[in-house]
Amino acid sequence: MGNRGMEDLIPLINKLQDAFSSIGQSVNLDLPQIAVVGGQSAGKSSVLENFVGRDFLPRGSGIVTRRPLILQLVNNKAEYAEFLHCKGKKFVDFDEVRAEIEAETDRITGSNKGISPIPINLRVYSPHVLNLTLIDLPGMTKVAVGDQPPDIEHQIRDMLMQFITKESCLILAVTPANMDLANSDALKIAKEVDPQGLRTIGVITKLDLMDEGTDAKDILENKLLPLRRGYIGVVNRSQKDIDGKKDIRAALAAERKFFLSHPAYRHMADRMGTPHLQKTLNQQLTNHIRDTLPGLRNKLQSQLLSLEKEVEEYKNFRPDDPTRKTKALLQMVQQFGVDFEKCIEGSGDQVDTNELSGGARINRLFHERFPFELVKIVFDEKELRREISHAIKNVHGVRTGLFTPDLAFEAIVKKQIVKLKTPCLKCIDMVIQELINTVRQCTNKLNSYPRLREETERIVTTHVREREGKTKDQVLLLIDIELSYINTNHEDFIGFANAQQRNIATNKKRAVPNQVIRKGWLTLHISIMKGGSKEYWFVLTAESLSWYKDEEEKEKKYMLPLDNLKIRDVEKGFMSTKHIFAIFNTEQRNVYKDLRQIELACDSQEDVDSWKASFLRAGVYPEKDQVENEEAAPADTFSMDPQLERQVETIRNLVDSYIGIINKSIRDLVPKTIMHLMINNAKDFIHSELLAYLYSSGDQNSLMEESADQAQRRDEMLRMYHALKEALHIIGDITTNTISTPVPPPVNDNWLQDSSPTPQRRPTPAASQPPSRPPAVRGPTPGPPPTMNPSPAFSTSPAFGAPPIPSRPAPPANAFNSSQDPFSAPPQIPSRPARIPPGVPSRRPPGAPSHRPTIIRPAEPSLLD
């Protein structure tokens, strides 16, 4: 007992599952569900039972299946069943399964024909099944009976739709043969969810219960009311057979006998019956598996390719080989040096697109962060003027000076130059931190040898720290050199004459007016009462800050001139994840609407620093905290006489000019000094001396001890590699050993939209003739009777006896029309089924339309003359 077709597929699935489980993955074939839909008592449950090969579903008249039964078949060595609502209880006797289904149905729906959409979940474990899901659904009905609600038709329809709308569901549209096919609810609902007909198979049941003298031959040959995948006729057990415990095997034999002995079906008996339905469904499963295989193969091949390079190193691996350890040590140190240099200098291959490398970060420090720190110190206007005023007065002492003293200029300049030491040392510290992070990043490849990694990190970091002292000394020496001699003959220095005529306003060096300095997204922080925070696209130019709705820059929200603007830091809120800075007007004017300052937020501190550096380029400088100084300042500082004011202004211009020269020099020399004394030296050290330090630091064997994780990883990688190759080989075998069937061509199934109750009187649609049938077997296409001569093949066919004649298909429907049908005259042929010789099957039921083409009986060839 069982489904042989399904059993043939089981080894194929098991092979695939073995191949994937060997590499620690599950094979996701996602086999289609199979759902049966149809009217009440159409034989849906019987069809499903035949497919499983087990007798376990409730039977009877009227509505028997009153809840959806989701039947999961699981391939297993032992055979038993489990219900989801009876966890842990195993049913070995399938009669008990049927009783439990009936009891569970009654528990929810009552015993008086009520229905429920709550499914019963049954799992059947058996060595004779595939991992499939079969769904037994309630029959469609029109009239409520018993406890059924008035809208029973819609409830059942919605229930069916939940299952059959899924693309992975094959629909068996079951219609009894003793019902008009054009009124089939099953075919109609299948057409709605599967308009192409790719997953719908028509199943005609109860062929043995048709009225005597009628048959479903035209339907089963897919001529009348055609479907893309055609129809399959089955003969299920009757209620008497079920009550009499007739075995499914015996029922299949009786079905076979019926099709072979029935005159209308014997010529297509090989395409009828439950075994052929099983075969068709299994071919669908095979097709699905074959369609899934390319994706699985690609997945395996990509994994194999990614492993091949690493596996190459391990193929001839011997852990205790001293030559291997020496070679590995040399290779790893060399690779570490190459990686470090690529991180610093940049590289075209293997570019990281997720984050900045060490070199890019150091570049950012040199050209954004360091200039920003310098400008923060230099541009402090009020404090500088106060210091100049004090210096002039202190140089003159008790005397009243007539000329601007150059000693005051030198004192102020030297004080400003000394302030440069802090940002320079801060820059070195930040570069060292980036270097150490880069070293750690590059030693990640040494994880296989933990001791080697630790020693490498320690040696290189120690060397970087040693160079830190020398670099700082050299940078401080640069500043001391600048302090040692104030060169007022520098070509860029403005001199006293120009300083006196120069105006502060002209001293503000701005970029080209229309030059765009930066664009990007920023969040504008405004209180909820005034609209709340919102993200805008900001554009910073040399003269203004504008923001737009988006990056297309079509809808401008506001444009803010940069005159008299400064930047100040804002503390991050308690719950805020953003980093904020503010722009305000030094003359206490509103910046935007009625706001004295606007707060702009970025996602990271790096973005804030970058925006601040961009504002510096535009001439917007950071604010200094001057409250304490202003409070402590004596009142006479600001009550200067005109002569002193002119002298302060002159020295201010001179200091501004000279500090600009120093600033330029320091911004150029400090990065060069750091590069030479620290970064390039570290690269040279790694390339030339690291290996010697490693050898002197300890035993080579202890350095090259492999971590337990690495040994395990190597073994797993080799096992995975061989398993992947085996899995690909198995998939290749399956691909070559299974046969895929093409999708049938589309048919004209517009009849499914029509509601005509008498489709038999309609001419057969032209598209119903299967295109695969060669025209040679049926002779010339019939024409008008006077010019028609029988072909030799046709006229001699009676000599082969009665049985071969029914196997010849009818001529194409488009060769005839109602006005010139050569067979429309003699009506007596289909009306006399009893006179036909016993060996020739009946072609047409008594009420068949006269305009349909009819195959001629062998006793009357003269009708063609």
Image: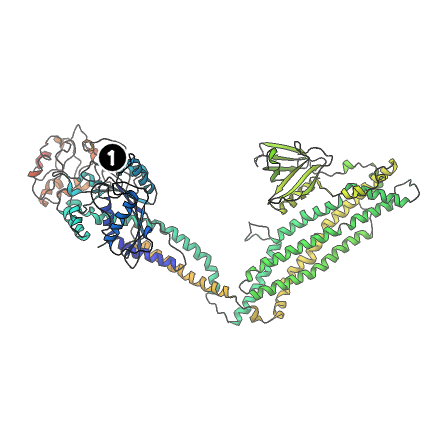
Do we see residue 517 in this rendering?
A: no
Q: Nearer the viewer, residue 444 or 183?
A: 183
Quarter of the picture holding the N terminus: bottom left
Residue 332: horizontal and vertical position, in percent? 56, 63
Do we see residue 451 in this rendering?
A: yes
Amino acid of disc 1: Val
The answer to whether 274 appears left or right of 862 in the picture is right
Above or below, 145 against 4 in this view is: above
Q: Residue at x 39, y 55 (%)?
A: 26
Residue 568: horizontal and vertical position, in percent? 69, 42
The answer to whether 769 appears left or right of 804 in the picture is right
Quarter of the image for residue 202 reads top left
Q: How many marks?
A: 1
Residue 608: horizontal and vertical position, in percent? 64, 44
Quarter of the image for residue 199 reads top left
Quarter of the image for residue 730 reads bottom left
Q: Residue at x 63, y 47 (%)?
A: 606
Q: Residues within 10 Å of mark 1 (few under 14, many from 20)?
A: few
Please name the residue that numbered disc 1 is placed on: 143
Q: Nearer the viewer, residue 478 or 578?
A: 578
Q: Residue at x 69, y 33 (%)?
A: 590
Q: Nearer the viewer, residue 265 or 394?
A: 394
Q: Secondary structure at mark 1?
A: loop
Above or below, 831 against 313 in this view is: above
Quarter of the picture holding the C terminus: top left
The answer to whether 31 appears left or right of 381 in the picture is left
Q: Residue at x 29, y 51 (%)?
A: 739
Residue 716: horizontal and vertical position, in percent? 45, 62
